[in-house]
Amino acid sequence: MKNPKDPAAPRASRAKAAATSLSQDIVYREFADNPGKVLGYRQLSRRLGITTKAQRDELFDHLKVLRRLGSIELLQNDEYRLGNPTDLQVAASATKGRKTTKKAAPAVAPEPTLEDEFGQDPIVHRRRSAGFDHVGDGPDRPRRDSNTVIGTVALATPRFAFVVREDGEGDDIRVFTDQLRYALDGDLVRVRLRGVRDGRLTGDVVEVLKRQRSEVVGRLQVQGSIGFVKPDNRKSYFEVMVPPQELGESRNGDKVLVRITDFPEHEGQGKSPVGTIIRNFGAAGQNEAEINAIMAEFGLPFEFPSAVEEEADAIPTTISKEEIAKRRDFRDILTFTIDPADAKDFDDALSLRTLENGNYEVGVHIADVTHYVRLGTELEREGKSRATSVYLVDRVIPMLPENLSNGLCSLRPNEDKLTFSAVFELDEKGKLQDSWFGKTVIHSDRRFSYEEAQERIETGEGDLAEEINLLNRLAKKLSAERFRKGAISFETQEVKFKLGEDGKPLGVYVKERKDAHKLIEEFMLLANKRVAEFVFGLKKTKPRFTMVYRTHDAPDPDRLENFALFAQKFGHKLNLANPKKVSTELNKLSEDVVGKPEQNVIQGLAIRSMSKAIYTTEPLGHFGLAFAHYSHFTSPIRRYPDMMAHRLLEHYLEGGKNVPVEPVEEECKHSSAREKLAANAERASIKYKQVEYIGAHIGEQFKGVVSGLTERGIYVEIEENKCEGMVRISDIPGDTFELDKDNYRLVGRGSKRIIQFGDELQVVITSANLLDRTIDMELVDNRPEHVKQRERAEREAGRASRGGGYRGDKGGSSRGGSGKGGRGDREGGKRRR
């Protein structure tokens, strides 16, 4: 029987009190008596004996007042806890004095379980939606006042940054860099709101609450005995001073990693932060120095900790008979892999056989990484931290040590391998008849490159040509069904390099996706979709079983409308009246622009107008793929969310109970952030190699397409190699040009010549700056030389008389596309499907 004084017990006396009066003090005592405990609104109502609407309203009003006073904190979905640090300590001390404790018996530490990974709390809470206050990092978080907000810094230019509000309410806040208090990208800050300027909410940083990173990559410039590091990040707004005693062996012009040890006080604005050099990459501009600098710039690891390598090396390489006996055996069924020619981490394989009923059994077999990477190990912690493999132009930074990624877990031919499989029964029309999920053992009979598989598709000849073509026919039917249901066909072009032994680029080309690539992609999409649908369907009522989903929201209507207006300038009309027909309209546009000069621009901007796919526990669907539920299951060697999905699926297949959502959601957020960082690092390495490649072609002419417009100049993307550079407006021959922002074009003052997105232009390469990763171009000018000389003289005279450059010539050298933002990405391709 419960003690009537127990706070958790029903209380008749309190119920009577509530019936007459519910004071703020009574509500507060519920939290003070239970320091650190999370109490929900309904739970409080039960404890206080509240039964009427008037009492519920009164309770809600008291909670709001206590929140404003900082006495309690709102966590999520009407859940609260004691918020004032002093109150928490006092209440904890008082409670400790009242409670008695039992002597615990010594326990043997059990082997980590899924609950160790995702938490012990049996209550499954729903994730908060935007608009709820965020608890922050604990009781030490500074209390808000009405004129300050907490948010994360996102640097935009050397002049200003945006602070993304933590509460999700309202627009981002613009803060000029002289009021940032030396905050960097990702830092958590408190901002005092100042008002609206140029239509934007502005503010000043009053406190840096948490610095995300204190390391900066840049080029060392030594002046006398003191060094200054100029950051590579073009959004940076200060240099870092390095005292003489911290220079070590570093020399002027070296590319270095510096750790900031002293940030000036705000009153010392204009001074440089002080730092120490912790890694020297060598002379700036050299391949190894620049690629290593990119790794450091994005915080990518250079090696695995020794403890992680030791654990990987200690894993047994043989598969026991007992382990095989636990699994479904596919070793006698035809199985093969299709991967890039230079791949070493084969994480997926396909098996195929014809069933007695005439249907086809297609097995999608995925490396059973979580069999080797156990919870609670250093391997697991490192994999979780990295969250993804990163594919730079000339190297891979793996999520797991090579012993696992290229050895134990890689589905190499002619070896028995442990796998986690999704097995499908399909009929001749590609209709799914049945699915099975479980642990398996396979033996790959053949390793195909994409080129070898494509050859069999095109010629019908070669070993296993019949089987590959059968799978290709089924894949095409799966694809047709996806697009019938509204999948979007826009795809980004992937740039690839031919590298010499010294790492220098010998050629640049655009990777072409052929049927062999699409074959693999369709069966991976099928497996990812069916795994998500299976887990979602295990429980018919809320809360559903917790799962890792890959979601992609529908496009923001305003951004889509802006894109439609842009496309209209090229004569393409998008009918957005019916939201259900948006994907149909986008696919029609994609087909219409094929082969036209504006194709790359239209398709690129279409993708950038979309939402970005993320990992989450919310089953929100995938707009781009037209799937109601979608996960990532097929690449656990290189994606941590896939490992999470494997563990959760195995847990549920074994009859396990639901797991708490919050820890899984946090790991989803971490994985999404790491994926974005990896994509940015990959783009930086591609840009560097493009600049390095084009540097060998100074003075040569190329055909390009206008890919961007700014007040400083036009960006031109060379068609044959996708290298992008800038032609400054002041250097365009024949006239003086101005930017017409509303119509996405430049207009000549005298000639009225128009240069707009998608226009084909002949350009000549004038410079390639490896240090800044920029390419400068000029338009080819075929006019007589005396005409060009006269124009140059007139322009120089004009500059002298005005004391400045032409409009758009204020920003110095080109920035190689940095002013336009990232390319974005979507599902598709083997790496990010």
Image (cartoon, rainbow, N blue to C red):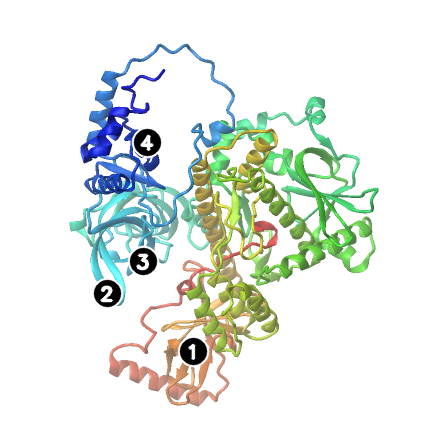
Reading the chain from its start, which is encountered first: label 3 or label 1?
A: 3
Using the numbered discs, state the Cα–Cα distance from disc 2 to disc 3 in whole angstroms. 13 Å
Q: In the rendered structure, which amino acid carries the disc numbered 3?
A: Asp
Could you classify mark 1 by the number of other residues whose Cα lies within 10 Å: few (under 14), some (14-19), or many (20 or more)?
Answer: many
Between circles 1 and 2, the one closer to the viewer is: 2
Q: Is residue 717 above or below residue 689?
A: below
Q: In the rendered structure, which amino acid carries the disc numbered 2?
A: Arg
Is label 1 in a helix, a strand or a loop? strand
Q: Which mark is residue 46?
A: 4
Reading the chain from its start, which is encountered first: label 3 or label 4?
A: 4
Could you tell whether 93 is left or right of 774 in the image? left
Q: Are marks 3 and 1 in contact (CB under 8 Å)?
A: no
Could you classify mark 4 by the number of other residues whose Cα lies within 10 Å: few (under 14), some (14-19), or many (20 or more)?
Answer: some
**Residue at numbered disc 1:** 745
Residue 830 is at least partly visible in this image? yes
**Residue at numbered disc 3:** 171
